[in-house]
Amino acid sequence: MKCFLCIVLLSLYFSITGCNHPSKATQSLPDTLSKPHVYSNEIDNVSLITLIANPKQFDGHKVRVIGYLNLEFEGNGIFVHKEDYDQGIPKNALWVEMDRDSAQLPGVKLCVKKNVLMEGTFDANNQGHFGAFSGAIKDITRLELWNVLPKPVENKHQVRFPSIHSK
C-alpha cells in the first residue's frame, strides 16, 4: 500500500510540475544528452508500469519515465523499484540502451543505483540482454537524479497544537 501511495504521489507531483527543475546530473553529459531540453507535447509522461503493461501502445514514442537506474555490463536497466533490482526481477524494468563511453561520464555515473528521470525513445521489441527485460529505452536525451522529497529540517520553534480529541 505504501508503494502504491508513493507511485500515486510521484505521478501527481510529476504531472503538476512537469519536471522543470535543473539538475547537476545533466551538466557532464555528451552533446546529445546535455543540450537544453525543449518541453513539448511530443514526449509522453508515462510510468514504467504503463509501458510494461502496454508496450505496443508506446512503441516508437518519446517517453519520460522515473525509475531506479542500474548500469553494468549486460545489466543496463531502469527498474520500477530498487527492490526489483535487488531481487533480480528484470521483467519489472526496461533495458537502457547506452554505450560504454556514455555510461562512464561523471554525470551519468552520478545517477547509477539511484532514482532518475529519463527521456528517450521506447522500443517494445528490444528486450535487452537475453530478452530478460520488458522493452527498452534508447536514444536517451535526458537523464537526471530524481529526488522530490526534501530532507527534513529540524525546527526548534515548531508550534504544536493539542489534539481535538484530548481533554
Image (cartoon, rainbow, N blue to C red):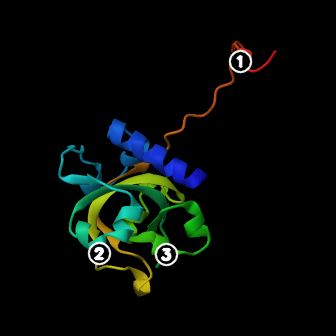
Q: Which mark is residue 124?
A: 2
Q: For the residue labelled by badge 2, is the local secondary structure a helix, a strand or a loop?
A: loop
Q: Quadrant of residue 55?
A: bottom left
What residue type is disc 3 on? Pro
Mark 1 to mark 2 CA distance (whole Å) = 54 Å
Looking at the picture, does residue 128 appear above or below residue 149?
A: below
Report the amino acid beneath label 1. Answer: Ile
Q: In the rendered image, which residue does mark 1 sit on?
A: 164
Residue shown at 37% from the left, 70% from the top: 53
Tell me whether circle 3 and circle 1 mark residues in contact (CB < 8 Å). no
Q: Earlier in the sequence, mark 3 or mark 2?
A: 3
Type of the residue with mark 2: Ala
**Which numbered disc flags the more N-terminal residue, 3 or 1?**
3
Q: In this figure, which residue is indicated by the disc labeled 3?
A: 90
Residue 54 location, quadrant:
bottom left
Give the class, few, some or many, for how many residues have Cα within 10 Å of label 2's Cα (few <14, many ≥20).
many
Identify the residue at image location x=54%, y=38%: 149
Q: Residues within 10 Å of mark 1 (few under 14, many from 20)?
A: few
